[in-house]
Image (spheres, rainbow, N blue to C red):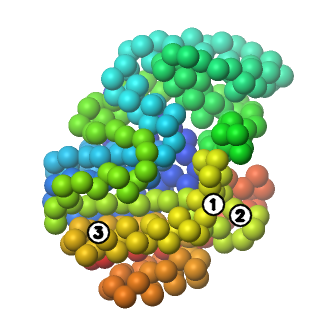
């Protein structure tokens, strides 16, 4: 049976489920096309698709090809996905701690030709790796260690079924986020959730793709926000409460609203480091 509410089917570091009340409060009630061009787990997309008056059209995109392949498979090949995930879950959960770890690293090192098998591998690793973190090395190889959870929910049929139903109304892409904005109108709405500007050297989390997401990309993103503003398209953007990011938008010669919200850091290996932090929300309305 499907869950009653839409939610991400992935664990995702930096995911926005905790900030949904703040984001939904700022989202327009009437949206022609909603764009989430750096969607990650797509928490806001699922929430908007599931509300009483959903957007007329939804476009989701991410530079992570495997991530977006998983969205396509969940939407288009749900039954096959559920069957294969059930096999993997049963195999993994039947093992002891050491054998689970070996199973994880064997799966992490495996290469698959078939799309469905790559997505099954991706979802398995997502549910059993450390904190749902997605990180790759310079060769583009996933290198997150085993999470050692007691009873991970590798197969959550309700969440996947609801996600599949909602994604039937979405256009799914993988590529450069700036290429998604075509034929936009004043009633469109864009939500940007880029890799955050690190607040310190040790908090850096820009290894989402081999090329990273540094300050040049932050500047480029600001220019896209300027472009949308000049064409009267509403956007909302999340980022760390870093002086550099504030300066980018304060100095944009446009009337951007910047507000602070509390969030919780969840990817620190030390529990003491998982305290509340400040994030900023930037909008042009």
Where in the figure is residue 230, as x and y percent of width and height?
A: 25, 76
Q: Earlier in the sequence, mark 1 or mark 2?
A: 2
Q: Residue at x 71, y 45 (%)?
A: 138
Q: Secondary structure at mark 3?
A: helix
Q: Residue at x 78, y 56 (%)?
A: 270
**On the picture, is 228 further left or further right than 258?**
left
Work out whether mark 2 precedes mark 3 in sequence or the reverse, and give the earlier one: 2
Q: Is residue 91 visible?
A: yes
Please tell me the numbered disc located at residue 265.
Answer: 1
Q: Are marks 1 and 2 in contact (CB under 8 Å)?
A: yes
Residue 44 in the image, given as x and y percentages of width and height: 37, 52
Q: CA distance from mark 2 to mark 3?
A: 30 Å
Q: Is residue 248 above or below residue 171?
A: below
Distance, label 3 to label 1, CA atoms, is: 30 Å
Residue topped by disc 2: 203
Q: Where, by quadrant of the figure, is residue 88 drawn? A: top right
The reply to whether the C-beta atoms of the residues labelled 2 and 3 are less than 8 Å apart is: no
180 lies above or below 22: above
**Residue 235 figure quarter:** bottom left
Residues at marks 1 and 2, CA–CA distance in whole angstroms: 10 Å
How many tags in the picture?
A: 3
Q: Nearer the viewer, mark 2 or mark 3?
A: 3
User: Residue 190 appears at what percent x and percent y?
Assistant: 31, 60
Q: Which residue is mark 3?
A: 228
User: Dot 1: few (<14), some (14–19), or many (≥20) neighbours within 10 Å?
Assistant: some
Query: The C terminus is located in which quarter?
Result: bottom left
- From this view, report whether residue 123 is shown above or below residue 32: above
């Amino acid at each position: 049976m499907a869950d009653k509410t839409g939610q991400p089917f992935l664990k995702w570091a930096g995911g926005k489920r905790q900030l949904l009340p703040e984001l939904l409060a700022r989202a327009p009630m009437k949206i022609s096309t909603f764009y989430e061009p750096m969607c990650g787990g797509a928490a806001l997309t699922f929430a908007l698709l599931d509300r009483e008056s959903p957007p007329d059209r939804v476009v989701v995109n991410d530079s992570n090809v495997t991530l977006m392949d998983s969205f396509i498979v969940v939407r288009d090949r749900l039954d096959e996905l559920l069957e294969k995930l059930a096999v993997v879950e049963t195999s993994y959960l039947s093992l002891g701690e050491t054998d689970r770890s070996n199973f994880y690293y064997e799966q992490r090192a495996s290469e698959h030709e078939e799309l469905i098998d790559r997505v099954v591998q991706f979802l398995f690793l997502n549910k059993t790796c450390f904190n749902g973190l997605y990180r790759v090395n310079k060769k583009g190889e996933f290198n997150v260690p085993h999470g050692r959870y007691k009873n991970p929910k590798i197969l959550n049929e309700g969440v996947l079924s609801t996600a599949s139903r909602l994604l039937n109304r979405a256009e799914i892409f993988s590529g450069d986020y700036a290429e998604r904005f075509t034929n936009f109108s004043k009633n469109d709405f864009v939500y940007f959730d880029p890799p955050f500007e690190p607040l310190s050297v040790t908090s850096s989390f820009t290894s989402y793709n081999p090329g990273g997401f540094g300050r040049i990309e932050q500047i480029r993103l600001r220019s896209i926000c300027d472009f949308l503003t000049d064409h009267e398209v509403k956007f909302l953007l999340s980022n760390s409460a870093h002086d550099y990011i504030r300066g980018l938008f304060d100095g944009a010669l446009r009337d951007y609203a910047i507000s602070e919200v509390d969030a919780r850091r969840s990817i620190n290996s030390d529990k003491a480091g998982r305290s509340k932090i400040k994030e900023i929300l930037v909008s042009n309305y």
